[in-house]
Structures are given as C-alpha cells and as structure tokens.
Image (spheres, rainbow, N blue to C red):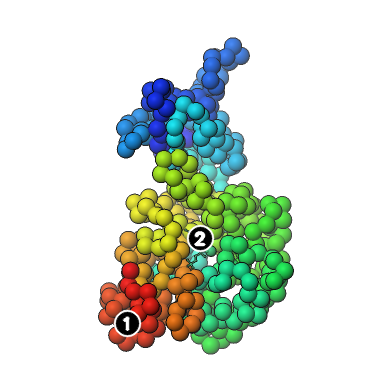
Amino acid sequence: MTKDVVATYYFRPRSDTTPEAAALAIAEEETTGTWTEITTTTEYVRRLDGEVLSLEPSGNGYVTRLCYPAEIFEAGNVPQYLSVVAGNLFGLARLDAVRLLDVEFPETLVPFAGPKFGMEGIRRLIGTTDRPHVGTIIKPKVGLNPKDTAEVAYKAAIGGVDLIKDDETLTDQTFCPMDERLQAVMAKLDEAKSETGQEVLYAVNISARADDIVERAEHAIDLGANMVMIDVITCGFTALQALAEAPSVTVPVHVHRTMHGAITRNPEHGIAMRPIARIVRMLGGDQLHTGTVSGKMSHDVGELRGDNAALTDPYHGLKPTFPVASGGLHPGKVAAELKNLGTNIVLQAGGGIHGHPDGTEAGARAMRQAADAFMAGVSAEEYAKDHRELARALERWGNR
Ligand SMILES: O=C(O)[C@@](O)(COP(=O)(O)O)[C@H](O)[C@H](O)COP(=O)(O)O
Ligand SMILES: [Mg+2]
C-alpha cells in the first residue's frame, strides 16, 4: 500500500504534445506547477511535486499512473482531495481528452468511518444472508399524492420487495409533501408487515441544501423513517458525509447518483464511476447505484464489476457498501444480472414491477420469483411453469 495518493488516468494528448509531456503537465498542474517556470518556488517545495509513475499506450490514447504526495492533501477534506485528483486537469488544452479511472488513497487519508450499516447491516435489518435484495422505485416518478404513494408501496411490500424508494426527482413538493408521504407509507408498511412478517425499508428522498440535509433526515427519522436517500452528485459528497457522520442519523443511507452520466459516461473524458464509488463508501453510503449489465442505461460490464468490487472488497477496514443494479430491469433480466454481478446486490425495478400486466403486487412477486429461480439454479422459463406472476412478466417483456 502506497503512503501517497496514486491516481490513474486515461488521456489523449493534443497532436503537438508528446504523451510524456502531457502526463507531466497533469502531475504539475495538480501539485506545484503551472504552464511556465516560476521564480517564486523554493527547494523545500520540490518534495510536493507530482510524479509520473507509469505511462503506456491504451486504445486511442495512454494510461498513466501519477503519484501525488500525501502532504498536499488535507486529511478528511474530500472537496480538497477532488480539487487535486479531479481538478483543473480536465480543462488543459494540451489534452484532447482525459478521464480519471481510479484513485488509491493511503490509510492516512481515509480517516472516515464509512457506512454505518453497509451491506451486512442492511442484510441484518431484512434478515437475509446471501440472496439478492429486490427493490422498487415508486412510479410514476412524480405526481402521486401521499395516499396513493402509500398504496403502491403496500402492494410492493405484500408482493415481497425488500426496499421501496422515492424517485430521484421526488423530495418535498406540494403535490406530495414529504411528511405526509412518509407517514402514510410507513403506516402501510406496518400493515404489510403484520400480514407478511417481513421488514421492508423505505428510502425517503431527503435531498436538499447541504446545511439543511441532516435536519431533514432527523425530522424524517422522527416521523418513522427506516432509511433515507440522497442524490449525492446534485447534493455534493460532503452532504452525504454530514448525513453518515451525524450520530442522530440512525438509519441506512441509500445513495442515488443522478447527474453522474454527465461525468462518467464518456469513456475518454471525465471521471469513471470507480473513484465515485470509493468516495461514497468512504463517506458512508450504505447502498449505491452502480448500474446494470442488461438495463436501459449505458453500461460497461467490465467497469461495472470493478466498481462493485470497489464497494465490497476489503478497503481500509470500511464496511462494504451494497451495490444497486437499477434502470430498465424486469424479471426476465434478473438471471443475467445475477450471473454477471453475483448475488450480493440490490436488484431494483420501477417500470419492471409497476408495469406488470397484473399490477404492482404481481410485479414484485415476479421479481422475487426470478431471483428465487436463480438461487435455486432453475431457469426463469422453467420456474415460470408454476409461478404465474413470473410467467406473465416473461410473456410481457421476454427473458432478456
Ligand atoms: O428513474 C429511473 O430511471 C430509475 O428510477 C429506474 O427506474 P426503472 O426501473 O423504471 O427504469 C433510476 O433512477 C435509475 O435506475 C437510475 O439509474 P442508475 O441506477 O444507473 O444510476
Ligand atoms: Mg429514478
């Protein structure tokens, strides 16, 4: 394990720039340098210079690993970390494209507690050991009033989901005020639990201004919330940190990444999901959306597996964060997701549950049946022979 920070970038230099000069330009820009020699530097500053550790061709460009001395980082200050590893470099004209692929932080720069619950803690709350969790997003995204939202939640819970969440755009709007919605949903989940005996988590979206978010979480918990959700990119990483580090926030934090595509999607320029996954785990995200292998959002299976490993592999003694596969999933896609990503995953479906021909409860049952089929080593088609809800889903959407 290095004692400094090592950042890995893909880049494509401008035609008049050698790859060596381009890699050095990043190392200088993000540490002690600028575009020209300066008269003000001193010998003792040199120890803080960035260094090019490796440089090799990759696709249309190059991959380089840069070393940033740990001393230039303020321990515990993630906005400052990002200003170095993901700062001005993206604007350097000498680079036609540059993408931060991954970043390794030394122990000294991970003074964070990480997830309070993490994957294991959430499994304990639900009472599972190895099966995938099934979740749903209330659909339509926005528009339902609190009473109807709670009714949809009740049907999903009776159908067997482990998690219900608000959509990323739903917070405390007048058509569905958070207080009313939360209390109505929790009351219906209690009703469902009295029928099924099954605990279900409801991730109420508390995304708000950074100096208000902890108070909003505390208020939600006072009203009975058993999980909260944050849009981490739009709220900011430190809003997640404030939530996760607040002793008063005693429930798991579900992390949505809406807006990430503007940063992560271009394979040549921006920030890959891996560094974001590491930071969310460090800052205490208990669950995090990372993508699917077969859903509606663009995806790279190799990258995705690595991103999920960054959430679940041993890392500075932090609890694993539960990866969430979501976006265009339905029961016919469950086997492909589990085959590629393993069963330590939350499979989430909105349209794939509420769009079931027989409604939400049947949609939830079909998702659970698809997961049960996989755990039993049986194909979805075979399992559907005596599981009607799954059969109806496969009829509607097929098995891929
Ligand atoms: O609004 C949506 O699209 C979803 O609620 C999925 O709904 P469906 O199940 O109806 O598609 C999620 O926000 C996406 O999964 C986010 O993408 P990602 O998980 O990639 O961050
Ligand atoms: Mg959504």
Q: Would you name the residue on which mark 1 appears?
A: 384
- Which numbered disc flags the more N-terminal residue, 2 or 1? 2
Closer to the camera in the image, 318 or 399: 399
For residue 233, above or below residue 82: below
- Whole-number angstrom distance, CA of label 2 to CA of label 1: 30 Å
Q: Nearer the viewer, mark 2 or mark 1?
A: 1
Can you give x and y, in whole percent of width and height, for residue 74 in the image? 59, 35
Q: Is residue 157 left or right of residue 215?
A: left
- Residue 287 tag number: 2
Question: On the rendered image, what quadrant is the N terminus found in?
Answer: top left
Residue at image position (38%, 23%) is 18
For residue 1, above or below residue 202: above
Q: Is residue 220 left or right of residue 293?
A: right
Q: Is mark 1 within 8 Å of ligand 1?
A: no
SS label for mark 1: helix
Hey, which quadrant is residue 128 in on the image?
bottom left
Question: On the rendered image, what quadrant is the C terminus found in?
Answer: bottom left
Identity, as a three-letter code, of the amino acid under mark 2: Gln
Identity, as a three-letter code, of the amino acid under mark 1: Ala
Q: Is mark 2 within 8 Å of ligand 1?
A: no
- For label 1, the crowd category at 10 Å Cα-Cα, with few meaning under 14, some 14 to 19 and many 20 or more, is many
Can you give x and y, in whole percent of width and height, for residue 317 in the image? 47, 50
Q: Are marks 2 and 1 in contact (CB under 8 Å)?
A: no
Residue at image position (44%, 54%) is 311
